[in-house]
Amino acid sequence: MNLTQRTARTALAMMLSAAVAVVAVSCGTSEPSRELAKVLGPVPPASSPPVQMTNSSVSLRLSPPGFADRASGAAMSQDQMSQDQHELAMYGSAWSIPATETMYIGREAIAGKATRRRSGGNFEVAVEDDAVTPEIGGGTLACIPAGASGPDEYIPVPLEHTDVQAAIDGFIARVGVTQTFLNPYAEKIEAVYVFPLPQDSAVSDFIMKVGDRTIRGIIREREEAKRLYEEARAQGHVASLLQQERPNIFTQKVANIEPGKSIDIDITYFGALPYRGGGFEFVFPMVVGPRYNPPGTTDPIRPLPRGVVYPTRGSDIPAASGTNVTYLKDNERSGHDIGITLELDAGVSIEHIDSPTHAVAIDRTSPTTAKVALSPLDTIPNRDFVLRWEVAGDAMKTAMLTHEDERGGFFTLMLVPPAELEDLDRVPMEMIFVLDCSGSMRGQPLNLARQAVKRALRSMRPGDTFQIIRFAQNAAQFEAQPVSATPDNVARGIRYLDELQVGGGTNMIYGIRSALSFDHEDDHVRSIVFLTDGYIGNEGEILGEIGRNLGDARIFSFGIGSSPNRYLMQRMADIGNGVASMIGLDASRVDAIDEFFELTSHPALHDVAIDLGGGATDVFPSNMPDVFVGRPVFLSGRLADGFDGDIKITGRVGDTAQSIECQWDGHRDRPALPQIWARSLIKDLNDRMTWSTETGLADRIRDTALAYSLASAFTSFVAVDSSRVTEGDHGTTVHVPVPVPEGVRYDTTVGRGG
Amino acid sequence: MKTKILVVASMLLAVVALMAAGDDAPNQGVRFQPVDIFIDSGDVPLGAWQVEFGGGDAVELVGVEGGPAPCWSEAPRYDPAALMQDRVVVAAINTQSELCAGRVGVARLHLRVQGTPAYTIKLIAAGNAEGERIEAEVSVAEGVSE
């Protein structure tokens, strides 16, 4: 660690970035007004209504001017209202608000500040606008029937707010996440929060803020960090511990939070952004879905109802292992909310930018840049936040970014397949559709999966063959062997889909084994298409099975639901030499299956080789993936000495050699690249651990993570405030309960033990 | 590597042996304790610094905090690669317009301590706002856990 001008610039840039993000937060907050806002209703039922219907409440979304609600498309345009009005839109097909109900915004009752009346066929509620002040906050407007347990449904939790600040440069994201823990109880507590992050995120910095003091956490071996934390906790020090449970699931512990006191945890991570369906995507997951853990799972992600202490009934999983996620019931709400601001510098002209999941405010600051803020009134953390932006197709070029420091040179390369591939046709295909029919897929998720497969069946060509496999507690299949895609067979396949029922656990391993077990014809390319929410706790077993038995098949995974297990989806596709897509819960996204057909309608670029003159080393993924039309891949590696910009990339399409030009803008200060490279190495080693018998993989992961200050399965961050000892013992441990993801039923998942 | 090193301080070695508490220390077992690092740059405003702290096998680093002076309140960075070799190397750069001169507390290290370690501190580099090397002295003082 030398004190250099480069380091100074880096520090300066990071500080400036943080300062800019603060400005963005300020811009995202609307001015309170004393004007009245009108409720328009009823609007036509949305195909996937964002309204949350519970036994005793009707939840509505409240949007300030300028925030378009993309989920329903029912938002009032800004020119229909004055600047000082708030828009209150109501969704759902069966709703009413009797005058006897009390209205809440978040946890705060606004009765007395709202009036309501029926006007013709519409129902109007006027809300004094100062009811939506920053003190009350935004979020869900709940109308609770008089006499119902309104305030009782509010569950105090020790996590008050999560704030996300992202800065995106091209396809590299630097994201800061601040978790504000606040002890709402009368006694000292330890807070435990299980939360998701993007599965490829390189968590490289960890800071604990106690009052106005800032303590940087230290990366340690996992067990050592845990020991240090527990010793500090036992001695009464404020301490925090960040552990990785899966590449996309983390546990945050904060010890000795005194009554009424607040402690902030700042986490920083880097990542390369995926390019899907014609655009880049920034995804911030907000909740861990309830997982099913098949018998024998050694490291489960265990869903528990709030207030339940493990072990629960009928489980054979040792209590000491795994991770517990506690969930709120349908009629329970906590005050935890989330804010997201994002500064985008795409580097090329942005053609379109939008969030398909949340209400956002978008400020196009230039043709190539934008500032985006999550609506402060769409802040319930119960589904993934997705922001997409499209750039001009001809602006997508293979490009390499490099960085040098005292550790040497690093690069990240976005490899865009040559356009000529689009002129080539594919060979006949054998498609194996594998549907998750477990309890968590009940309702809209399975309906969407059915629709997607039907759409795919209707798109098949006569020379293709297909098979359908369903799995839940067990696996079953449409036919003994794949059948030709004749009109008659397709019709029978559609009837089979219509008759599928949901229920039971998620024994995905049976579905995997069934899909990989068929003999297949050599002149057909086998594609296995998984449609699932991925809510399982035995990801390693699944990935290991694929790694060992894939053969020459490809795997295409489709994540269903508002918060699918993106880690599992992406790793299945990575190991399966295919691609992953997310369908979400919106029926309009069923056409994501079309992207699969577009990808597979042309041959892929294979045997990709990179020659960087002086040489490139340690390039990951180590098994160079095939490159599909419209799906760039990202490679990360080390630069050997002597690199001077001479880049040659070659590949083959069938038997034809292809050469790909690559842009390089010279060495620039990009401190994210070493972290991204190290994370790519760790990901590669992790994947090999699931199916390889190599020894020493865990040691390599640990050493890499320690050297590059990264959270991993074998390293954790710990921070202790040794300056002060709090009074009393270490207090009660409180798990932060989270909502089940939107579209997932509590009673068929958490309520039944996952 | 093409990096220009603008700050290469004179190697001031200030070894400060602080024997903790003495024989009548209340706790000879495991405890958590802060130590404060001070740098005296004389009349020259301090813009950057890097030190190596030592405490032997009895000490583990569990947190790095800024110093009490406003110009060094940001948490410094530590070198994770050095930590793998049981070395604690800490550094910070001040990019603010206001810089401090004289003897200022630049960092507080949070430690897990066992027994009575002897602390050492070595200044690796110090620089002014222009990135030029400057003379400075470093010292360490045991903090109190309240």
Image (cartoon, rainbow, N blue to C red):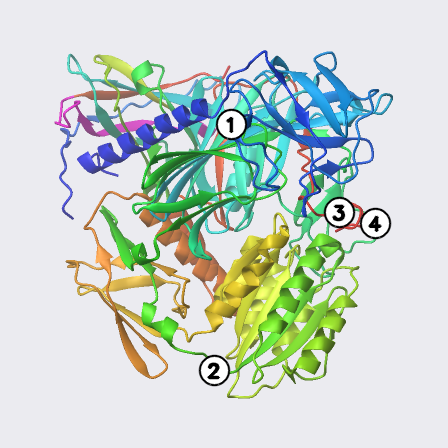
The residue stretch that appears in magenta: B109-135
Q: Say which of marks 2 and 4 sits in front.
A: 2
Numbered label attached to residue A79: 1
Amino acid type indicated by mark 4:
Arg
Relative horizontal placement of residue A685, taking residue A158 as reference (left or right): left
In front here: A646 or A661? A661
Chain-order first, disc 4 or disc 3 = 4
Q: Residue at x 33, y 77 (%)?
A: A652
- Disc 2 with disc 3 on a shared chain: yes
Does A94 appear above or below A537?
A: above
Kindly check if marks 2 and 3 are in contact, taking CB atoms under 8 A apart as contact. no
In this view, the mark in front (1 or 3): 1
* Label pair 2/1, CB-CB below 8 angstroms: no
Q: Residues within 10 Å of mark 2 (few under 14, many from 20)?
A: some
Dot 4 falls on a residue whose secondary structure is loop
Can you identify the residue that label 2 sits on? A427
Provide residue A126's location: percent of width, then percent of height: 68, 18
Nearer the viewer's eye, disc 4 or disc 3?
Answer: 3
Say which mark, if any, is on residue A313: 4
How far is disc 2 from disc 3 in space, using C-alphas? 41 Å
Identify which residue is drawn at 53% across, 39% down. Answer: A242
